[in-house]
Amino acid sequence: MALEVGGPWTELQLKATVCCCCLSTFLLSFRTKALLDQLCRPPDQIHHHSKMAAIGNRGTVTEAAGFDAAADAEKLRGAMKGTGTDEAAIINVVAHRTIAQRQRIKEAYKQTVGKDLADDLSSELSGNFRSVVLGLLMLAPVYDAYELRNAMKGAGTEEACLIDILASRSNNEIKTINEVYKREYGKTLEDAVSGDTSGMFKRVLVSLLTSGRDESDKVDDAQAVQDAKDIYEAGEARWGTDEVKFLTVLCVRNRNHLLKVFQEYQKISGKDIEKSIQSEMSGSLEDVFLAIVKCIKSKPAFFAERLYKSMKGLGTTDSVLIRIMVSRAEIDMLDIKSQFQKIYGKSLHSFIKGDTSGDYRKILLELCGGE
């Protein structure tokens, strides 16, 4: 099937192409569907049409040339054989292959060793280093679903995880995460979130989970002015805050339209929308609305700020650091790094280096790429 490079591929064409490319064993699991959904992106987001390519085109992790899944599987097996573990060999393979290539390595490992690669690595490694390696072996929506599940397991909820993921993913990504979550954990993500959160914060998350945001680039100027007025009148201009108005505008409108709304809001109120949210709201609700606004303005800047806050001051919030480094490595890590440098005047590389240690530091620095 001849396909024009960078042309508008239909989902059917792409799936047919991938199927033709001998993914027969790989196609057996539902995870493949999730990967295909990841690969079936609009043409402007397609890097090049290799089936082993990165899922974005601004990542530090790119498709390894001369890739040989069987040879990589053998290297990983050798790294775990005998006494001790060769962590450097593991980093060398895992941090320098795309998600799609890692799936091939997992298949090859199972064929040649008769065991599950993730299980073997899990028993050989420990701590944060293990979390990074195991995260890298998962498909993007599988990793997101896994992180969301962990955030809600046991007593207490890691609201930051729910916010980081749900405020920053596209409609298609959220749809796939919903499907994966249901298959992996036997309940809908909406039920899980509803059972673990409450009030207006819950309503915002449930709205985001419907993956109903308008993703066109149409801007209705009159509507943008009206939306800005509605938000102003729901917050700054009254006693108390009508949060539903914020939800309706921030969770439903498209990006270009919202950028226009933010401009109009500044004109009407004399304040940046972020400042108003900070003064009108608190807690998780404030956090989720701010995350939505920041992601609409610039996802790389949003993730740069999350990384900075995970490392500044005493101690490190490793869950946040790991989640962002693993999930953005082959999507937009180059842009996150440049935003980090621009906003904080220091490199992300230097921050990670100063805040982590051992093999955990080594693998994160590989995912970060050079200074």
Image (cartoon, rainbow, N blue to C red):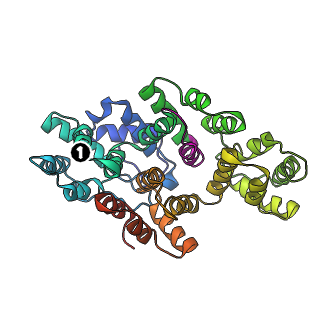
Instruction: Find the magenta span and give its range.
Output: 154-171
Image point (44%, 36%), residue name: 12
- Left or right, 17 with reference to 162: left
Image point (55%, 48%), residue name: 164
Where in the figure is residue 307, as x and y percent of width and height? Answer: 50, 60
Where in the figure is residue 130, as x and y percent of width and height? Answer: 31, 48
Residue 324 inside the magenta-drawn segment: no
- Left or right, 216 with reference to 177: right
* Dot 1: element: helix
Image point (56%, 62%), residue name: 305
- Single out the residue that lies furthest toward the left: 82
Where in the figure is residue 243, as x and y percent of width and height? Answer: 78, 42
Labels in figure, total:
1
Residue tagged 1: 105
| Quadrant holding the C terminus | bottom left
Image point (13%, 48%), residue name: 74
**Residue type at numbered disc 1:** Ile
Residue 236 visible? The answer is yes
